[in-house]
Each structure stands twice: as structure tokens, then as C-alpha cells.
Amino acid sequence: MVWRFWKTRRHASIFGKQLQAVDSDPASLPYVTTQIPLYNEANVAERVIRAVAAMDYPASRHEIQILDDSTDETRQIVDTIAASLCLEGKNVQVLRRRNRQGYKAGALVEGLQCCKGKLVAIFDGDFVPPRDYLKRMVPPLLADGRMAFVQARWGHLNAGHSILTQAQSIGIDGHFMIEQSARAYSNFFMNFNGTAGLWRKAAIEDAGGWQADTLTEDMDLSYRCQLVGWRAGFLADVVVPAELPQSYTAFKSQQFRWAKGSIQTALKLYPRVLRSQASLMAKIQAFLHLTHYGIHPIMVFLSVLTLPVLLTLNMQIPWQLMVICMLCILMAVCGPNALYISSQVATRTGFKKLLFLPALMCVGVGIALSNTRAVFEAIFNVKSGFVRTPKCGGSDRSKTNNPYYAYRVNAPVFPIFEIILGLYCTVSLIVYIEAKHYMVGPFLLIYACGFLWVGFFSFKEGLESGQ
């Protein structure tokens, strides 16, 4: 993917320059509906609504739908802001349902049924679109009548908040700048990321609409659109800042949803991908894309097996095989590092952020146990609800004055198992070092640090929230 990114980057740059600017005549502009799905997000509701309303697009051609499923004070906040914006001449509608059937997908379905726009933008509550967002995102859909959607790159509002948010920002930069760019310009299957994208309404309807049978309705619809002949686009230069999860429990909840949903989508759609007319490389990449969270059960399996293998097996490995193993390990280490280093070079954010790369490695390992549960729930069709990620909105996180704590994700017993697994990996590390098997040491060290780190802070957050 790194190689394909650098290979296709010139094509992406040419594509961006060839796009014509949006005509300033309002009558010639396509009608756009912006949907903002919300559920109990008092900390961020006003920020995202006002940012959408402030976008530089004629009010006569821009409809704003607030799809509010909230049951708390968010409802009052939404109503107050909507009324204020309507007085300013904005076309703002608040849609509420009697139940949350279908969760976010269900809300998007209801909004789509009554929206006026042929193009539909979607923003989650923790995103803050720039003023020129629509004027930069509309041209690709006007230039290509078979383009289903265009995805913008996620930025970060709070990357400097903690080590956790710094680590997440590196991972997200790698995903968007390298992976999404490479997919978009290599004719691979590409996914809409659930927010900060602009859709063609006809493509949504042609592919069967939003469906709630997976936890990643965005990935599901993206693949279905491309399977029926639509294309997907990505504009890396359009950056929409967003809030990163600031707690370990919130981050694990988000990753759990993504892990389970992507495996559900793989089970649902990959057989169709295999039967499609896509290239062999596109099918291979789609498999890696849809099932990449399957690495977490393998990581947990390996962490458990390391100690029994050392204690029960006594093998003399030929030096030739050892060299091959070392080369494979070197490639496995260099691949992700090349991805993240390339993303920082491409985004021109400097190399200072790469100091947090070890933290990303540890956090990526630390969530493996939680994501393993997600993968198996998907495989065995265990039903679970859509748990949205709590947002702080940049406000004070003290318990006394912030509803963030009311939105905290419960973390009852799972952190204890993560801590136990971390202690087990620590014992395995000590045994391997005493046996002079130094090659495995660095990996066991990352495993031990990752499980202990994530487990400890998750447990601590659970105690603070009274769980």
C-alpha cells in the first residue's frame, strides 16, 4: 500500500488540479443535504451544527437535517440552535424517531426519505467541517457521473491531549493518507468512513440503501455501491478536524465496533467480491481490508502459546531457516513503520509525532483481547447494539460539571483479563530471556506493556466512573 501510494500520488494531485471550481451562481449549484446524526451528544451538538451552517454554500441550495435520536438535554440544545439558525435564513430541520431502530443507519434511512438534495453530506457529532468543505467536495461528483461518494481526510482537534490521542492520530494519518489514497487511485475497493464524506443519493438507493445488519453500515454500503458499478473518490487535501477518543474505554469501544462490523461485512459481502469482475489484486486487497481485525485473535493466540512452546519443545533450528525467519520478522516490522513514516512525510506534520510510534504499537496490542471478542461475536452472529463513542467537546472533563461522565462506556471486568494476560506475557518474557531466546524478547515486551497499559488505565477509568 505504501508503494502504491507513492506510485499513484502524482495521479491524485493531477486529479485534484483538474477539478473545476464550483460556479458561484447559486442557480447552477446542485442541491445538497447535510445530515448530522446525533444521540445524546450534548458536548458537541452545538459545535457541529454551527460549523455545518457556516459552510460557504448558498442557503437556498443547502438543507441541514439534524437526525436527533437523543433522550437527554441534547434535544433542548438542538432545538434552540435550530430555531436560531432558521431565523438567520438557514434551512434547518430536526427529525426525531419514536425509537432507535437501526441505530445510525436507521436514522440515515429516514433522513434520506425526505431529503431534497441529490448530494448528501454526513457529519458525526465530533467533526468540525471547514467553511469551504462543500465547494471542494462537490466538483468530483459533478465531474464523474458514476462516482458514488467522495471521502475527505480526518484531521485531529485534540491530538496533543495525551499519549493515547497522539498514538491514535498516527494510526488515523496512516489509514487515510496512505491506505485510502492507494485504494482510491489503484481501482481497489474503498470504504466511506462514516462521516466527512459526500454521497450521491442515487448511488445509495441503487445499492440498496443504508442497512443495519452490520455495525459498520458505512463500509457495507461502500462495498455494495462499488459491486454494482459505482466508483469511490478520496480527497486527501480536504481535511475535516475531529475529536479523538480521550479515554481508553471509549477508544476500545470504538475499535470493538469497527472490528466486529468489518468482519460482519466480510462475511456478508466478500463472496460477492470474489464473484465480481474486479481484478485479482483488488480482491486480495479487499480480503485484507475487510478481515484485517482478524490479526487480533492471532496476536492473543500467540501471546498465550509462547510460554508452553518454550517449555515443551526443544528444537534445533538450522541457521538457514533462522535467516529466513529473521527476514520475515524484519519485513513485518518495516511494513507498518513505513506506513506511518510515509503518512507523516505526506501530511508534512514533521517527525516529532513519530516519537509516539511505540505507544501506538503498545495500544494496538493492548486492545487485542477486546477486539478478539468482537471478531468472534461477528463470526458466531452474536447480536449487540451500536454503542457510539463518547465525546468531550473540548470542555472540562471533571465529574462535577461535564456530562461526558454520564456518557462513559462501561468497562466492568474485561480490563482484569487484560492485566492478567499482560502479567502472563511478562513471565513469558523473563523465561525467554533466561533461555537466551533474545529474538522473541522485543515482541513479548510490546505484548506485556500493551496489555498491562491498556488494562490498567481501563480498570482505573472504570473505578473513577463508579463501575
Image: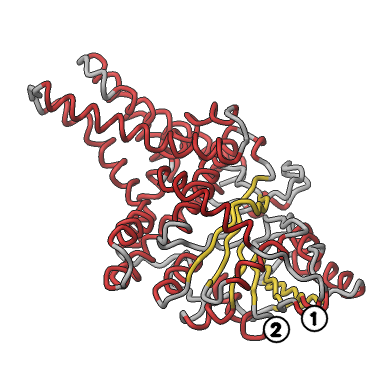
Q: Is residue 465 left or right of residue 327?
A: right
Q: Is residue 279 left or right of residue 238?
A: left
Task: Compare residues 189 and 467 and report the one nearer the observer.
Answer: 189
Q: Nearer the viewer, mark 1 or mark 2?
A: 1
Task: Compare residues 335 and 296 and report the one nearer the observer.
Answer: 335
Q: Which residue is mark 1?
A: 27
Task: Compare residues 271 and 211 and report the one nearer the observer.
Answer: 271
Mark yes or no: residue 37 visible.
no
Compared to residue 160, the image places residue 406 above or below, namely below
* Amino acid on which the number 2 mark rests in the picture: Lys
Mark yes or no: residue 108 visible.
yes
Question: Neighbour class for label 1 at 10 Å: few (<14), some, many (≥20)?
Answer: few
The answer for how far apart the CA atoms under marks 1 and 2 are is: 15 Å
Disc 1 on helix, strand or loop? helix
Compared to residue 436, the image places residue 452 above or below, namely below
Compared to residue 203, the image places residue 358 above or below, namely above
How many marks overall?
2
Q: Which residue is mark 2?
A: 116
Q: Residue visible at 59% across and 56% down?
A: 235
* Amino acid on which the number 1 mark rests in the picture: Ala
